[in-house]
Image (tube, rainbow, N blue to C red):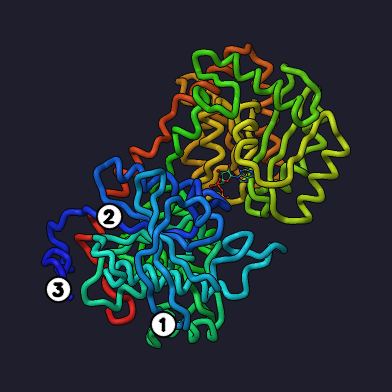
């Protein structure tokens, strides 16, 4: 195969960025388990708006196949480590972004979650599933799938795409690679047998490569081999270089810190706009009083006491320890001992936390409501209805719900960590005075520290109404659209193309 001249020039000098292959394991509106899907459903569109040829590739899960219409076969691939042919399918995301699906029926055609079975346990063959997905993406990146298209850069996301930069590093001519860490605590750790099953190059089994304390790490493929590493907020980029939040990878991340950058996630301003959101009673900063109608409706819907003057707190999120919902549960008795406070939870996950939430909601039916499950439309109604949003995450790479809250005039109460500290400005006297305050920020991931922030919010709410409105509408006026972040990514893509990273094994 003859490659175009600019493609072969790995010095990359002056080669302009045109085309990007965005590899990801979930994307809205096709499939979502967390914030990764929000990003993958929005960032490629923002990049395409900047004139780039962006194409998305995902595994062909049944939900994705169902929602990708029309869908046509492109080619059939043979991949190392799997005896069956794998099909490459083509569709479009949002009617415009070319979307490719890797169809390996034995691996992806299963009911349920992309990563776990119905009982919430990781699929036993996840290494094989995502290993083959990665091999298929590499074949696409090298134009070995009959598409006649060579990307300038492959943008990989989280451990499910970690082997792509490693495999591409073996190629003499290759596109540049970016690896984005959306959450370092999920690493894709498997055993040596899985490594062998994927028939990976033997030299990858090294502490400089994919080996991690005697195990096989997908995420190291991204962190050690990618030309550039990004994560989803500047604060988290610093935090993952420390032993506290580095998850054992802080040494590698420090070593690569000259190629590590934090870019704050944007949000999809079309889906999350209180002025046009068809799932709520619309409002904006100019007619903020209409937000109250949403409170009344949600109180009615969830069986809470109907009272517009109640101070309604909300929490939405995966029920995992990271999100600190246990801290909210700890302060709940104190919180509802305050006259006229109510709390609503929307979440799914840990069965123990689900049971506890159900129990407290039964115990205080007029004051606490818990919807246990995943419901996108309800998440919009909760954001629109609440006065305050509780987000006491122990760590938070970026966090989207506090940004949705800001946009919906729902004052966030957040732990000072990661993206939460980059997006919420504490209501200190000085910040209130200069009009910068947007929420309440507390310093320790403890019930005591959270409670102090909640008490500050309750006290502030008792001040003249106009003060609260100013705090909430300042949040509504912040710009968290994708434009700024997409331009940052474009700059990083260009740097990655111009300065390929040395191979960590042979350097
Ligand atoms: P993470 O990616 O760690 O789950 P983020 O805050 O970045 O956290 O993103 C979570 C996304 O998932 C947000 O869009 C949030 O609204 C949504 N979400 C989480 N749990 C639920 C739920 N039970 N119902 C609806 N949406 C949810």
> Can residue 504 be seen?
yes
Expressed as whole percent of the image width and height from the top left, the position of residue 247 reads: 54, 65
| Cα–Cα gap, marks 1 and 2 | 29 Å
Query: Which label's residue is closer to the chain start, 1 or 3?
Result: 3
Task: Report crowding for label 3: few under 14, some 14 to 19, many 20 or more residues within 10 A (C-alpha).
Answer: few
What residue is shown with label 1?
80
387 to the left or right of 284: right
Left or right position of 428 against 18: right
Q: In this view, does 131 lie above or below 245?
A: below
Looking at the rendered image, the quarter that the C terminus falls into is bottom left
**Residue position for label 2:** 493
Residue that badge 3 annotates? 2
Numbered disc total: 3
Q: Quadrant of the N terminus?
A: bottom left
For mark 2, give the secondary structure: helix
| Of residues 47 and 490, the one drawn nearer to the viewer in this rendering | 47
Q: Are marks 1 and 2 in contact (CB under 8 Å)?
A: no
Residue 21 at x, y percent in the picture: 33, 58
Q: Point out the tag, 3 or 2, that comes first from the N-terminus.
A: 3
Residue 143 appears left or right of 134? left
Residue at disc 1, secondary structure: loop
3 vs 2, front mark: 3
Spatial CA span between label 1 and label 3? 24 Å
């Amino acid at each position: 195969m003859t490659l175009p001249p600019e493609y072969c020039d790995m010095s990359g000098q002056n080669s302009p960025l045109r085309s990007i292959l965005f590899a990801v394991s979930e994307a809205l509106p096709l499939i979502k388990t967390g914030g990764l899907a929000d990003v993958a459903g929005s960032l490629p569109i923002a990049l395409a708006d900047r004139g780039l040829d962006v194409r998305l590739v995902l595994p062909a899960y049944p939900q994705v196949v169902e929602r990708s219409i029309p869908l046509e076969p492109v080619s059939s691939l043979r991949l190392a480590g799997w005896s069956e042919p794998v099909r490459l399918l083509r569709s479009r995301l949002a009617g415009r972004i070319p979307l490719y699906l890797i169809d390996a029926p034995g691996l992806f055609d299963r009911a349920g979650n992309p990563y776990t079975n119905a009982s919430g346990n990781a699929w036993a063959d996840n290494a094989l599933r995502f290993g083959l997905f990665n091999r298929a993406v590499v074949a696409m990146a090298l134009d070995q799938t009959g598409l006649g298209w060579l990307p300038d850069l492959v943008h990989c996301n989280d451990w499910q795409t970690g082997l792509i930069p490693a495999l591409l590093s073996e190629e003499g001519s290759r596109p540049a690679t970016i690896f984005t860490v959306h959450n370092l605590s999920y690493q894709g750790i498997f055993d040596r047998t899985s490594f062998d099953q994927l028939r990976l190059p033997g030299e990858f089994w090294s502490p400089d490569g994919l080996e991690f304390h005697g195990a096989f790490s997908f995420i190291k493929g991204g962190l050690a081999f990618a030309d550039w590493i990004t994560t989803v907020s500047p604060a988290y980029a610093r935090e993952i270089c420390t032993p506290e939040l580095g998850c054992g990878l802080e040494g590698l991340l420090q070593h690569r810190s000259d190629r590590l950058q934090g870019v704050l996630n944007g949000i999809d301003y079309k889906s999350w706009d209180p002025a046009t959101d068809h799932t709520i009673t619309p409002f904006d900063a100019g007619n903020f009083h209409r937000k109250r109608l949403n409170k009344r409706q949600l109180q009615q819907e969830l069986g809470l006491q109907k009272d517009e003057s109640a101070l309604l707190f909300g929490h939405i999120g995966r029920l995992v320890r990271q999100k600190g919902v246990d801290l909210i549960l700890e302060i709940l008795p104190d919180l509802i001992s305050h006259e006229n406070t109510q709390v609503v939870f929307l979440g799914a996950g840990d069965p123990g936390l689900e049971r506890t939430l159900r129990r407290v909601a039964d115990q205080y039916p007029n004051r606490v409501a818990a919807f246990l499950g995943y419901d996108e439309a309800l998440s919009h109604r909760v954001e629109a209805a609440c006065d305050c949003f509780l987000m006491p995450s122990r760590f938070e790479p970026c966090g989207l719900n506090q940004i949705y809250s800001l946009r919906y005039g729902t004052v966030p109460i957040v732990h000072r960590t990661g993206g939460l500290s980059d997006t919420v400005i504490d209501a200190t006297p000085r910040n209130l005075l200069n009009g910068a305050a947007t929420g309440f920020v507390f310093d320790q991931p403890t019930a005591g520290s959270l409670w102090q922030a909640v008490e500050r919010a309750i006290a502030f709410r008792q001040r003249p109404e106009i003060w609260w409105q100013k705090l909430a509408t300042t949040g509504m006026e912040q710009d968290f659209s994708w434009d700024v972040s997409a331009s940052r990514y474009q700059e990083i893509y260009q740097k990655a193309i111009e300065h390929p990273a040395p191979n960590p094994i042979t350097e």
